[in-house]
Image: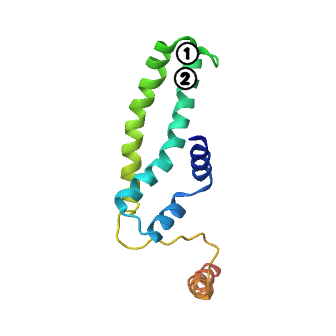
């Protein structure tokens, strides 16, 4: 019964960027006390997956529990060599991600806008031309 939930969550994590997720939650008027932990969770799982792979690589490099079934054959050793460092790193990662989320200004009361960079208007092009033309003339020696 939980498999559809896991599949949906995995699809959402793999296809959704955090900025898009922020805009959706803010448009739905979800409170920041709910939105910020959701944003941290979206960044948390891929980071923990990378840390797990790094831990397994370090164990294989040292010759500890190499192979796919080694964690099942030696559960106490896997608890000591994999889970303890992973849990210690998870606390640090979750704290760092929370700080990074708040530092990006996601706790501010102003609305968030999604900018993909493909919607430049005439004013944007005019501003770029006004800034670029004098610079090009100065470099060319005309000014």
On the rendered image, what quadrant is the C terminus found in? bottom right
Q: Is residue 15 above or below residue 54?
A: below
| Residue 63 is at least partly visible in this image | no
Q: Relative to residue 95, is residue 113 drawn left or right?
A: right
What residue sits right under mark 1 in the picture? 62
Percent of width and height locating residue 66: 61, 15
- Where on the picture, by quarter, is residue 92? top left
Percent of width and height locating residue 50: 55, 36
What residue lies at 34% left-to-right and 70% top-to-bottom?
109
Q: CA distance from mark 1 to mark 2?
A: 6 Å
Q: Nearer the viewer, residue 45 or 103?
A: 45
Q: Relative to residue 101, is residue 129 drawn left or right?
A: right
What residue lies at 58% left-to-right and 81% top-to-bottom?
135
The answer to whether mark 1 and mark 2 are in CB contact below 8 A is yes
Q: Is residue 29 above or below residue 14?
A: below
What residue sits right under mark 2 in the picture? 58
What residue lies at 42% left-to-right and 36% top-to-bottom?
90
Q: Is residue 143 above or below residue 48?
A: below
- Element marked by disc 2: helix
- Where on the picture, by quarter, is residue 91? top left
Q: Is residue 75 above or below residue 47?
A: above
Q: Relative to residue 18, is residue 118 drawn left or right?
A: right
Percent of width and height locating residue 126: 60, 88
- Element marked by disc 1: helix
- Where on the picture, by quarter, is residue 64? top right
Task: Check disc 1: other Cα within 10 Å, few if <14, some if 14-19, many if 20+.
Answer: few
């Amino acid at each position: 019964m939980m498999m559809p939930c896991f599949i949906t969550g995995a699809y959402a994590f793999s296809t959704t960027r955090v900025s898009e997720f922020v805009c959706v939650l803010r448009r739905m008027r979800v409170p920041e006390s709910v939105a910020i932990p959701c944003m941290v969770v979206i960044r948390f799982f891929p980071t923990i997956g990378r840390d797990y792979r790094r831990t397994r690589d370090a164990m294989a490099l040292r010759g500890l529990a190499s192979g796919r079934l080694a964690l099942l054959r030696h559960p106490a050793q896997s608890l000591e060599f994999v889970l303890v460092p992973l849990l210690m790193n998870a606390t640090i990662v979750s704290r760092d991600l929370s700080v990074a989320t708040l530092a990006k200004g996601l706790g501010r009361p102003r609305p968030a806008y999604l900018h993909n960079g493909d919607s430049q208007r005439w004013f944007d092009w005019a501003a770029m031309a006004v800034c670029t033309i004098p610079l090009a003339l100065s470099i060319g020696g005309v000014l």
